[in-house]
Amino acid sequence: MDADGDRDGSPGVDPARALADGGRPEWYRDAVVYSLDVKTFQDSDGDGWGDFRGLIDRLDYLDELGVDCLWIRPFYPSPLRDNGYDVADYRDVDDRLGSLEAVDALVEAADERGIRLITDLVLNHTSVDHEWFQRAREDPESKYHDYYLWTSHVEQAYNTSNIFPEYEDGVWSYDEVADKHYFHQFYNHQPDLNVANPDVQEELFSIAEFWLERGIDGFRIDAAHPMVLPKGHNAHRMDDPQWFFRELKRRAREVNDEAVLLAEADDEPDRLDFYFAGGEAFDALFNFVGNSHVTYGVGVEDTWPLYRMFEQIPDADPDGHVWWANFLRNHDEWNLLKLPHEALEHAREFFREGHGDGRDSWIFGRGHRLRLADLYDGDHDRIAMAHSLLLSLPGTPILFSGDEIGMHADLDLPERQAVRTPMRWDGDEPNAGFSTADPADLVLPVDGTGWPGVFQADVAGQRGVAGSLFERVADATAARADSPEVARGDCSIVHVDPKEVWAHRFDHDGTTLVAVHNFADEPREVTVDFDVAAGDAERVVGDADYRVGDGAATVTLDGCGYLWLRGRRR
Ligand code: NOJ
């Protein structure tokens, strides 16, 4: 790979506008996705809230990082009791963040750079502030009453545990106006929609159409798993949930034939096939099994979790119907429930070490409200290696805003807000360059202290600085763009001896690409099959030394070292 040619979004496979055989869009398989929250990314008007105009001003940064697609977290009008996942109006924009016209301007500016946009669609529930709920509670005769799930006999009603167990006792709350209880799997201010109701289904389809008509390229469907769980007094389910998702896709594709649907479905591994529906429903699923196993394995310097992850999930299938959206961290807690129990217990203690100030990062009985930099003790070599690994896995990689510079969590903030503080652009500027507002007016504090002695990362200290974390992540995104093997090749695990080294390979169109990652802090050497003439071997990314000969490559890795090596097979 030539060193500079690849930062300009000129991937080995042109993801532009192509539909594969069978009419499926291809672009998302090659894309590097970046997840951000507009309100904490860049404030352009000094009111303390990030906004669409500020995001547009920062597109060059994202372009330079090698981002092909933004996943924009909820920006709709909302009381923000769950960071916007409590939607009060699906067809508008929180006016502190911008307007519908500002979204149009972003669509246009992003398109000029070849960057696509995916937004969050929260279809499982609304905010209690949504007009539907207000009308529902006021008038039991109105059609909106049946948009939600009510009971007058809560003692006899179906009950189950709430998804936020630290905050909610169960799934029913009393509403004084309706004089009934309503069903909610999340916070009590997020009543579940009666998604089995055809009127509700039609509303949800038309919301998707509304945003696609504005130029959005697809959706992250929030809480897809809770959507299909039993709901309401009689534990009712949608008659045919696959039909709902298939129909959502059909309606979406009618507006935009390259629209993609990405599911947040943290279901059991043997249930995941269901969401793909043989290629007819979701195009990709978040890889929650991968998230817990990969981030844990890299942190504890052991590869067994990766072997286990590949055993548990259906194989990604470049031609077909199973595709993963891989990630190291996201804006929620680092959920460890997919790990075996002993490993979960180990992770609970292990990742608390090193911070030592007694503040508890454990939440919901299942995870840590920490960022990657906290999990890896601020070690940029480990964070860079983890990103290289992420970008080399079969599936679409999703970067979490701020992790590319090693931002830390702020445990002084409540709940998951700890991992959602504003982007740190320049530590020498007020509010680290996020906003010119008085710090008291910021949407969330800019993390300036963290744990005593912890280095506060910023963009200014890393962008353009050779060997910085930002530059290494950008090199890895460029490598991914230049490696059609990863999205399209046959992937296989390469078994190597040291348990701290993970190796896998792709075979595609006559070439082999081998990716080797050393989770240990100490150097390691491995030899892997590599049937390429020595002169044909090409370093794609990573600075490990290698020798090629006799059908093999011997790779000498520093602690946290990595290498992607490509060649034409003999
Ligand atoms: C998943 C989102 O990622 C999370 O932030 C939110 O609280 C729940 N869904 C409820 O919408």
Image (cartoon, helix red, strand yellow):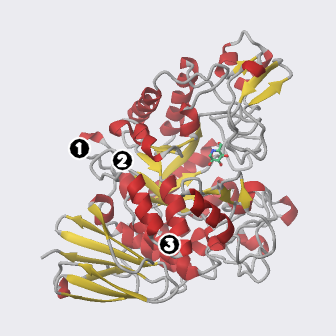
Q: The residue under label 1 is which amino acid type?
A: Asp
Which quadrant would the N terminus be assigned to in this image? Answer: bottom left
Say if 108 sits above or below 231 in the image. Answer: below
Q: The residue under label 2 is which amino acid type?
A: Val
Query: Tag on residue 21?
Result: 1
Q: Earlier in the sequence, mark 1 or mark 3?
A: 1
Q: CA distance from mark 3 to mark 2?
A: 23 Å
Q: The residue under label 3 is which amino acid type?
A: Ala
Q: Quadrant of residue 51?
A: bottom right
Q: Are the residues tagged 2 and 1 within 8 Å (C-beta)?
A: no
Q: Residue at x 22, y 83 (%)?
A: 552
Please indicate whether residue 278 sits to the left or right of residue 329 in the image.
Answer: left
Q: Are the residues tagged 1 and 3 within 8 Å (C-beta)?
A: no
Q: CA distance from mark 2 to mark 1?
A: 16 Å
Q: Estimate how packed mark 3 is, as few (under 14), some (14 to 19) or many (20 or more) residues with alpha carbons within 10 Å.
A: many
Query: Tag on residue 386?
Result: 3
Q: CA distance from mark 1 to mark 3?
A: 34 Å
Q: Quadrant of residue 22?
A: top left
Query: Tag on residue 322?
Result: 2
Which quadrant would the C terminus be assigned to in this image? Answer: bottom left
Closer to viewer: mark 2 or mark 1 = 2
